[in-house]
Image (cartoon, grey):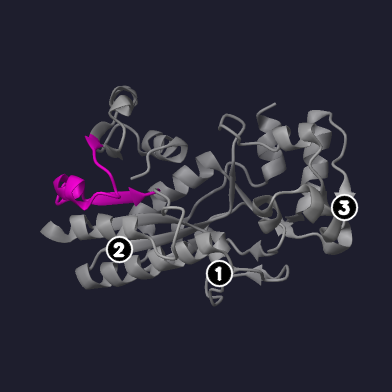
């Protein structure tokens, strides 16, 4: 579900063994999905009637579709699981959530056991989806794995590097006001999705991030050096609010360092790209 860039990478990581299906809302994507080795199923998570074919269709589900960009709930996830449960539900379901569900942690190291404190509407929608999926999984004995995902990057992903921001000269915060940022390479995320299908514990959440723990300003400055570009200007939070959009500022209002030990111990994911800077350098 939600077979975009990460979905296609997940399909490649699954390999030629299982029969792979992909839900798509666009008939124009049917041919590209078939070319990628997936069987397209046309349906829309906003239209419950179009999802009836999903009942009993798959034993394992990777749910990557985002919630709609309004309200504080996720009706798409509800529509999906109601369709899936008509014939008993799948054996396992992996849901890609966001690390934003933790809210601002003032730079603290954040394990999965930390109470959720979403601050944005988009994070509230993800908490709603997580809660609903856990309840649904318990009711049907379906293993639901929640992957809490930070910034996804990859040099071969559209918008998957900070290059455009650096070329535009977008500012970062001064060191005393900076926030920690977390990342995961899109290929490592896809591999985490696959491993969670088989190894994820029932109704369990996992932080999916690399080992790098850098303030955003330091990360962007190091990335600029990789690309041979000037370091981004440093501004105070007040000054930055005058030149950045509210959406851009929202990413500068929360600081946390995600603890990925559960990912390594339970999913046994060995990161191909332990740091975002190494992943960016590999793409040069």
Question: Which of pointers 3 and 1 lies earlier in the amino acid sequence?
Answer: 1
Q: Which mark is residue 235?
A: 3
Q: Nearer the viewer, mark 2 or mark 3?
A: 3
Residue matched to label 2: 143
How packed mark 2 is, by other alpha carbons closer than 10 Å (few <14, some 14-19, many 20 or more), is: many
| Residue 54 seen by the camera | no
Percent coordinates x, y for residue 25 in the rendering: 30, 37
In this orientation, which residue lies closer to the viewer: 178 or 279? 178
Local crowd size for mark 1, using a 10 Å CA cut-off: few (<14), some (14–19), many (≥20):
some
Q: Residue at x 53, y 66 (%)?
A: 101
Q: Answer with the quarter of the image where residue 156 lies.
A: top right
The disc, 2 or 3, on the residue closer to the chain's N-terminal end is 2
Q: Earlier in the sequence, mark 2 or mark 1?
A: 1
Q: Is residue 54 magenta?
A: yes
Relative to 9, 271 lies left or right: right
Residue 121 located left or right of residue 219? left
Above or below 66: residue 36? above
Inter-mark Cα distance, 3 to 1: 26 Å
Q: Residue at x 20, y 55 (%)?
A: 84
Range of residues picked out in magenta:
41-64
Rendered position, 137 above or below 79: below
CA separation in Å, label 2 and label 3: 46 Å
- Quadrant containing the C terminus is top right
Q: Residue furthest front?
A: 242
Binning the other alpha carbons within 10 Å of mark 3 as few (below 14), some (14 to 19) or many (20 upward) gives: some
Q: Nearer the viewer, residue 206 or 32?
A: 32
Residue furthest out toward the left: 87
């Amino acid at each position: 579900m939600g077979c975009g860039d990460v979905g296609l990478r997940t399909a490649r990581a699954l390999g030629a063994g299982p029969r792979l299906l992909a839900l798509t809302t666009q008939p124009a994507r049917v041919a590209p999905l078939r070319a990628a080795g997936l069987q397209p199923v046309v349906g829309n998570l906003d239209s419950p009637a179009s999802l009836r074919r999903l009942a009993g269709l798959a034993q394992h589900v990777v749910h990557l579709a985002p919630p709609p960009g309004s309200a504080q709930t996720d009706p798409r996830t509800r529509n999906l699981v109601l369709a899936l449960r008509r014939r008993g539900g799948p054996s396992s379901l992996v849901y890609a959530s966001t690390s934003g569900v933790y809210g601002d942690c003032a730079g603290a190291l954040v394990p999965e056991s930390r109470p959720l404190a979403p601050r944005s509407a988009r994070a509230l929608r993800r908490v709603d989806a997580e809660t609903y999926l856990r309840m649904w999984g318990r009711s049907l004995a379906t293993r639901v794995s929640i992957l809490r995902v930070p910034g996804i990057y990859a040099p071969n992903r559209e918008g998957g590097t900070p290059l455009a921001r650096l070329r535009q000269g977008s500012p970062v915060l001064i060191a005393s006001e900076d926030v920690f940022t977390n990342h995961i390479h899109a290929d490592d995320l896809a591999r985490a999705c696959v491993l969670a299908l088989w190894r994820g514990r029932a109704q369990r959440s996992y932080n999916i991030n690399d080992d790098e723990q850098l303030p955003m300003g330091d990360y962007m400055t190091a990335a600029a050096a990789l690309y041979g570009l000037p370091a981004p200007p440093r501004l105070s939070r007040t000054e930055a609010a005058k030149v950045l959009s509210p959406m851009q500022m929202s990413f500068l209002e929360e600081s946390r360092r995600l603890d990925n030990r559960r990912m390594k111990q339970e999913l046994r994911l060995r990161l191909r790209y332990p740091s975002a800077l190494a992943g960016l350098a590999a793409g040069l």
